[in-house]
Image (cartoon, helix red, strand yellow):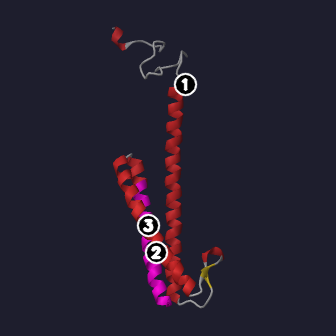
Amino acid sequence: MTQAALIQTLSIEAGAIAAFGRALADEREAIKRQDFQALTDLLGKKMELAQALTRATAAREAQMIALKLRVGAGGLLIGGPLEPGVAEAWRKVVFFAHKARDANELNGAIVNAHLEFTQEAIQVLRQGGAGPNEMYGRNGKASATAGGVSLAAG
């Protein structure tokens, strides 16, 4: 096993992570547009990218073991002298991984905000009953107790 082979594998892994990050950016845009079909399509794409990333990571880890390298504190490669290309390729992997993690956290926060809003709206609608401020009953129809002036009453 050579460090040149590791550089190639790190490049493949960095590309896989970058592609996953682009899919996360596409996902965020689809969420903003409320394009649920695009979200469905992106889910399949993300699954494929995640599998490719898993394979790339496994190959890199096997090569690192063969070269007696490991990831130390702060994400640094340690264990022996490194060719400059290895260090540069590793920096790209770490950079794209951080970007993808941040994008994933942002998407999660957006989805959680939408979910919280939806749950609150559902809770308001479920509070049905005979309260004077009820607009709709449990059956979804206008409540007989809804106050106000009818526009059809002339």
Q: Is residue 61 left or right of residue 23?
A: right
Count of numbered labels shown in the rendering:
3
Q: Secondary structure at mark 2?
A: helix
State the residue lying farthest toward the top.
154
How many other residues sit within 10 Å of disc 1, few (<14), some (14-19) or many (≥20)? Answer: few
What is the secondary structure assignment of the residue under circle 3? helix
The amino acid type of the residue labelled 1 equals: Gln
Identify the secondary structure beneath mark 1: loop
Residue 21 in sight here: yes
For marks 1 and 3, give the CA distance: 44 Å
What amino acid is at disc 2?
Ala
Q: Which residue is mark 2?
A: 56
Quarter of the image for residue 52 reads bottom left
Q: Position of residue 7 (x, y in %)?
A: 47, 84
Magenta segment: 1-27
Marks 2,3: beta carbons within 8 A: no
Query: Which mark sits nearer the N-terminus, 1 or 2?
Result: 2
Identify the residue under disc 1. Answer: 127
Q: CA distance from mark 2 to mark 3?
A: 9 Å
